[in-house]
Amino acid sequence: MSGGVGSGRIAADRMRQLLRTYLVLGSPNCRDHPLRVLEAALDGGVTLVQFREKGPGALTGEPLRALAAQLLAACRRRGVPFLVNDDVELALAIHADGVHVGQEDEAAARVRARIGDRILGVSAHTFAEAEAAVRHGADYLGIGPIYPTASKADAKAPQGPAILRELRDRGITLPLVGIGGITVETARDVIRAGADGVAVISAITLADDVRQAAAQLYATTDAGTSTT
Ligand code: FQP
Ligand code: MG
């Protein structure tokens, strides 16, 4: 796992593997207790987890911290790294494996200085944002929204998988994960366009069978076995 004393920044190849099936979740996204949803998703094979407590009824204060610690512990039991969205303070308090920040959050370079070698993910919507995030010390970029999404109230216009191809063509080699409205039906297209993996909320958290949904996404995102 990243961030151990003296272990240095995560290697790009390891980061690519972790991005394969990336679950983003918080209590507003879950019909069941988030811990139960997370456990089922881990059973299904998710490779990385981001705690994103946003939306109607989002927890704050001590209940927020307690849930984060509980979800982190579940990930630790399975050896799956656990990142915190936006909240660097919370990430440091619970000793999370990293942080994900967007363009309107604390500046990436500042977050890098605060978190040391922990994993830093940065959202980018354009080549200019991607290029800047690379310079500011991101370990991976979250690119989206690829498709329309209901999970983020202030989401920008969907860009389609073509944005990933554009970033690759223009020389971005950092690990990339697509996010926004991705389903088991479209995950393959996102990988083919140049992503190392897919990040999803509802495709897993709102599935009738969470474990199966995670397993299907994992099976679909194997970058090495494309047959088309
Ligand atoms: N990509 C990823 C992931 N996670 C995210 N949370 C975002 C993009 C979006 O700050 P941001 O980040 O634009 O919005 P919010 O804080 O509401 O999520 F890493 F998973 F690809
Ligand atoms: Mg954010």
Image (tube, rainbow, N blue to C red):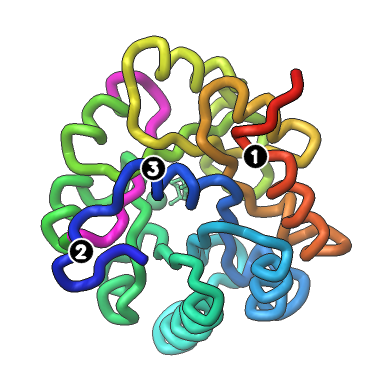
Q: Position of residue 12 (x, y in %)?
A: 33, 42
Question: Which quadrant of the view contains residue 103?
Answer: top left
- The residue carrying mark 2 is 7
Label 2 secondary element: loop
Which label's residue is closer to the chain start, 2 or 3?
2
Q: Is residue 155 left or right of residue 30?
A: left
Residue 98, position as x, y percentages in the image: 33, 62
Residue 222, disc: 1
Q: Residues within 10 Å of mark 2 (few under 14, many from 20)?
A: few
On the rendered image, what quadrant is the N terminus found in?
Answer: bottom left
Q: Is residue 59 visible?
A: no
| Alpha-carbon span between mark 2 and mark 3 | 15 Å
Classify 155 as above or below 119. Answer: above
> How many numbered marks, from 0 up?
3
Label 1 to label 2, Cα distance in Å? 27 Å
Magenta stretch: give its range.
117-128
Who's the residue at 78% across and 59% down the image?
Answer: 206
Q: Amino acid at mark 2?
A: Ser
* Secondary structure category for the residue under label 1: loop
Q: Which amino acid type is marked by label 3?
A: Asp
Is the residue indicated by label 2 positioned so its CB lies within 8 Å of ligand 1?
Answer: no
- Is residue 113 inside the magenta stretch? no
Q: Callout 1, which amino acid? A: Asp
Q: Which mark identifies residue 13?
A: 3
* 128 w.r.t. 58: above or below: above
Whether residue 121 appears in magenta in the rendering, the answer is yes
Going by the image, does 29 lie left or right of 1?
right
Vertical position of residue 24 compared to residue 6: above or below: above
